[in-house]
Amino acid sequence: MPQQYGNLTRWAEQGVLLLNASLTVRANEPNSHAKIGWAEFTDAVIQKISDEKKGVVFLLWGKFAQDKQILIDETRHYVLKAAHPSPFSADKGFFGCKHFSKTNDLLMKEGLSPIDWKLLTP
């Protein structure tokens, strides 16, 4: 039987898109692929979502994500910002930011279904 805990498929099925600024790196070398074209790709994805959708809640975690804010039409969407959830910075503003409950509040304000953020645990 496949592992079920930690699986984010249920989030995707509810409309959650997780997107990093760079989608690959060399092992143990953070940002090693930052300058190979991923920024153009991820910028285009964010721009397309911003242009074609309405009422999207963008969660920008960390500086790289927050630099993408300029691509988002904030008259049509919501932007929530916090520190990156990595072990190195989560205690600098990610813990306690309540982005999951705030996202659900904003979705319901838009007349949309809230996200079931629960993950199965082992």
Image (cartoon, grey):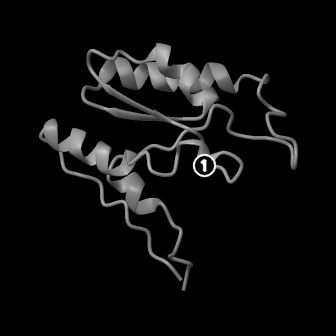
In the foreground, 45 or 28: 28
Q: Residue at x 36, y 50 (%)?
A: 100
Task: Count numbered badges in the picture.
Answer: 1
Against 1, is 54 above or below?
above
Q: Is residue 116 left or right of residue 109?
A: right
Name the outermost residue toward the bottom.
Answer: 1
Q: Residue at x 23, y 52 (%)?
A: 114
Q: Position of residue 39 (x, y in %)?
A: 66, 22
Quarter of the view holding residue 106 = top left
Against 33, is 104 above or below?
below
Q: Is residue 63 left or right of residue 69?
A: right
Quarter of the view holding residue 10 = bottom left
Quadrant where the image shows the N terminus? bottom right
Q: Which residue is mark 1?
A: 90
Q: Residue at x 44, y 75 (%)?
A: 120
Quarter of the view holding residue 54 = top left
In the foreground, 12 or 57: 57
Q: Residue at x 68, y 38 (%)?
A: 23
Q: Position of residue 97 (x, y in %)?
A: 43, 45
Q: Position of residue 96 (x, y in %)?
A: 45, 50
Give the secondary structure at mark 1.
Answer: helix
Against 99, is 51 above or below?
above
Q: Is residue 50 left or right of residue 22?
A: left
Against 77, is 103 above or below?
below
Q: Position of residue 31 (x, y in %)?
A: 79, 34
Mark 1 nearby-residue class (10 Å; few <14, some 14–19, many ≥20): some
In the foreground, 73 or 79: 79
Q: Is residue 105 left or right of residue 7?
A: left
Which three-letter amino acid code belongs to the residue tagged 1? Ala
